Image: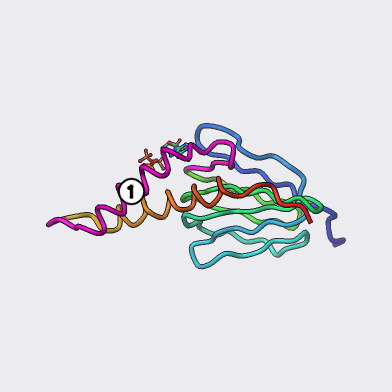
Amino acid sequence: MAIPDHLTLEIVTPERAVVSEQVDEVLVPGAEGSFGVLPGHTPLLAMLQVGELWYRRGDETSYVAVSFGFAEVQPDRVTVLAQIAETAEDIDVTRAEEAQGRAQGRLDQPVVDMDFERARLALLKSLTRLQVAGRARIRG
Ligand code: ATP
């Protein structure tokens, strides 16, 4: 089979379609590590972790904060079904900074019966949002 020219990238959450684009390359934050996808990739299904996904179209790279869900890879498409997905423009930086402060405070001063995993994930989500919000579209 011929190698496709592009990938169709679809990123959807239960609420909305976040990205629907023809792209050249995608980096997916998989639960077992981030992995890159180029056209012609072997089909696979991967769970997502909380992290930054990026995709490149020509020399333009765009970033999306994703949390939980699945990525399905086919030779000509990547479909991401995420619980949460936000582009840099979607992210409220003040809200993410406040969430970071709360999560960091809980982890710094744990109380009895604290849910560490919840606090760790809240910190990771807020840091990922701040990272994505801080990225301008990069050219070249
Ligand atoms: P917070 O503690 O600020 O509510 P959270 O990590 O608990 O953050 P989530 O449960 O991950 O929030 O998300 C709930 C909804 O709020 C989702 O639709 C998510 O996209 C949105 N959301 C959360 N934080 C932000 C943010 N900083 N900017 C924009 N949207 C956000």
Q: Which residues are magenta?
A: 84-113
Q: Is residue 33 above or below residue 117?
A: below
Identify the residue at image location x=41%, y=55%. 124
Residue 119, position in %: x, y?
A: 30, 53
Image x and y of residue 123, in percent:
37, 53
Query: Pointer 1: what residue?
Result: 101
**How far from the left and from the top, in percent, is residue 82?**
52, 45
**Residue type for callout 1:** Gly
Which quarter of the figure has residue 74? bottom right
On the rendered structure, is 96 left or right of 79?
A: left
Q: Which residue is rendered at x = 58% and y = 42% of the image?
A: 88
In the picture, measured across the screen, residue 46 lies left or right of residue 79, that is: left
Residue 100 highlighted magenta (yes or no): yes
- Furthest toward the right, the residue is 2
Q: Residue at x 49, y 52 (%)?
A: 128
Figure quadrant of the C terminus = bottom right
